[in-house]
Image (tube, rainbow, N blue to C red):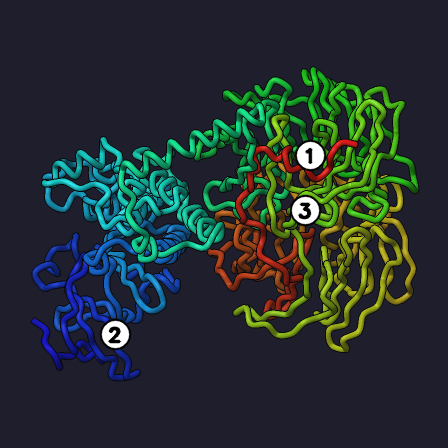
Amino acid sequence: MLGPGKRLGPYEIVSRIGAGGMGEVFKARDTRLDRSVAVKILPSEFARNAQVKLRFEREARTISQLAHPHICTLYDVGSEDGVDYLVMEYLEGETLAQRLEKGPLPIDQVLRYGIEMADALDRAHKGGIVHRDLKPGNIMLTRGGAKLLDFGLAKEADLGGPISPSVSTEKKTLTEEGTIVGTFQYMAPEQLEGGDVDARTDIFALGAVLYEMATAHRAFPGRSKASVIASILKTHPPSILESQPALPPALDRIIRTCLQKEPDERFQSAHDVRLAMQWIGEAAPVASTRSARRAAPMTVAALLLALVSVVAALLFIQERLGRPERRIVRTSIVPPNASAVANSAPPEFSPDGTRIVFGTSSGTGQAAEQLWIRSLDSTTARPLAGAENGTYPFWSPDGRQIAFFAEGKLKKIDVAGGPPTVICDAPSGRGGSWSGNTILFAGRYTPIMRVAASGGTPVAVTRLVKGADVTHRWPRFLPDGQHFLFVASPTGAENARTRIVAGNLSGTVHRPIASGTSQPLYYDGFLLTVRQGALIAQRFDADALQVRGDPVVLTERRISMSALLMRSHFTVSPSGTLLYQTGELESETQMMWYDRSGKELGVVGPLQPYSSLSLSPDGNRIAASTGMASSSVWIYDSTRDVKTRLTAGDNDLGPVWSRDGRSIAFSSRRRDYPDIYIRDVAAGTERPAVISAMDKIATSWSPDGTMIFYQATGLPSETDIRYVTVADGKSHSYAATQFVESSATMSPDGRWIAFQSNESGQTEIYVAPFPPTGAKWTVSQNGGISPRWRGDGRELFFLHPSDQTVMAVPVTLGVTPEIGKPLPLFRVRVSLGVAPWDVRADGQRIIAAVRRGPEPVREPMTLVQNFDVALREAAPDD
């Protein structure tokens, strides 16, 4: 028995605090740092139990992985005289269980603590950890907010690999001691039944805790353990509004969703729960429960009389107006799995307006990883199996199929299920529209193409005029099924001369309609588009193909838009429902030096958009392409803080230094396609390296300067790796499959190529020999992009695609490469581009184009029902 004055190492016991899920807890003093700590001890009678001790040790490992303001911090772990202990942050306050003895919490505290708990769980789940014993007794309320305690029952989340027997839950009866871990009043059904446990199990427990915070009653009460278990497995708790009618109905919906019996029907991530609670707080100031109690209670008779009066008034108003009043209703739609709506797969309504399809990304929000379908009458979305990595989806006229772009093809898939089928080749898709058996679609630098929905050879229905337009994209059929609207741009990105144009299927119409910088939508006599982030509406005669009247602004908040893509996140259903998303998709960037620990060492150049950059061999100069609508290449001398313009074009990008520092290869759109040129830096002379009918970006020189590697996008595959021999200008294939291979860079010894490919289902880094033999070795684990060699070839760097962590991998190049374990260095918010970072030859300094604007869009989508009411009020008919 420990008492005051007893020491465990440098920790002097002060007093006993209580008991956690796995042992006693004492307040102690750290004699070295003179601070109060909490010491948790595994009792000696349990220490002899190998399974219990294993769980105790696992708690130490679990907590040590978590660094979050609302998770109790682990300071130390030790063992002395047979006593095993943890040393944790000492928290002053009371447990949530103690607070609930006084009654329900005010709504503002329910939301505050609920948001903090959800955020803490989100951090744990992203680290692969499930708590499994979330309850009021394991939540401390402090001045700084809620703190989660006791991860002693946590287990590492199953990530798809084998489950270790030491952490699995055996499927035995509930009467067997030690079988089911956790506190059964807050356990999810699958946990009680001994099934698999994941993050959604904690979400069930969080719902039970929120229920108790709001009502001071347990969600699943019972007189015995058996009755509680039966209640959890079979019944649903009463609405929180029954006992607390002043609470927001939205909170009731959140809690009910958390407490669904089936894991698939719950929120799929704690991140989603946090966002949903934040929106309640942001929608309107919340009144405290205390102030609600000050209101005089209403009798049942008075309540019924009030309801009768309200109904009578509504009937009177409807009779006077001749029709029921249509009100604008706004709700939020949350992307699943804590993901962002992908920039390359914004939402689209089904023809009947009852469903949406959209894509999500776990990274920057740029590349779609999964397409989802959500019915508006459902709280969850379901993945569209077979449409992984699909982009820019759009519906068939009957709503039974969805077309999308993937692997250089235009494909279609049945919504009810089944494998996708290929319609035609379509590299770098930029939107489509479907009417009858005809599909319109576009590529990055193509005219609008027409193809039969059943498949066939595409035919151009618009024409790109040299010197006028370099791209036509985002086609949208008009009601007659013969005419359509699209975006035309002279630069391939948002520009003052970007406009909305009308065309027809025979290719005989090309009529400019209005200025516009994003996709056009037609809705019941209106043309809708986005300009400078604002949703704009203008009366439009679809028969005469003419706008009339003045454009009006419909939204106060800025709608998410990509100037590079000329595409916004908004869509309108035929029934008059608007769906949009707010937040920035792109932002200004700053070139920044870092050391290997992530410490900022200085800035280079001004704050402006940088799409790609490359370090000179001496590490002192940076070649960077700047600008969004029209880019050019500049050289920045980081030692003298001066810049020099390298190219005078307005469509130059992707510079890459030669290994001797004398030349730079870059892409320039001076013809119909971006071609690769070589510029002598000292002499200023220039010559073409690769001229061909496909999109091309240079990525690396060979050490001897005889070859330039580049990625090419064109028919028949999506993106392949090629190289050109500089002396004769001949182009050769290095990697050409149905998958996307890109970002090739040659090792310093000229014998190996590092590149990225999505052949495994996600983008990974590989190393393969040069010349190619068919063999390759995987470098990254769970994703990797944009590889970079150290100057001696003994280390390979890359970025993790989801959180943009800089990773370093030791490499030994021999007959076969020996590849070590990737080690995380630091996280960096790089800009969206071909090559937004580089590494000095010594591997000690890193230059990156860092986004200085907001984080990637992870806001919910906003659904506006009866949006057409506001539209007609803002733009009344003449």
871 vs 436: above or below: below
Give percent across and percent down for residue 751.
Answer: 65, 52
Between disc 3 and disc 1, the foreground one is 1
Identity, as a three-letter code, of the amino acid under mark 2? Val
For marks 3 and 2, the one nearer the N-term is 2
Residue type at the position of mark 1: Arg
Q: Which mark is residue 561?
A: 3
What residue would you read off at disc 2?
37
Front residue of 428 and 792 = 428
Q: Can residue 56 be seen in this snapshot?
A: yes
Q: Could you tell me if the residues under marks 2 and 1 are in contact, i.e. CB atoms within 8 Å? A: no
Provide residue 39's location: percent of width, then percent of height: 21, 70
Tell me the kind of residue under disc 3: Met
Mark 3 vs 1, N-terminal side: 3
Q: In the shown orientation, is residue 871 left or right of residue 137?
A: right
* Quadrant into which the C terminus falls: top right
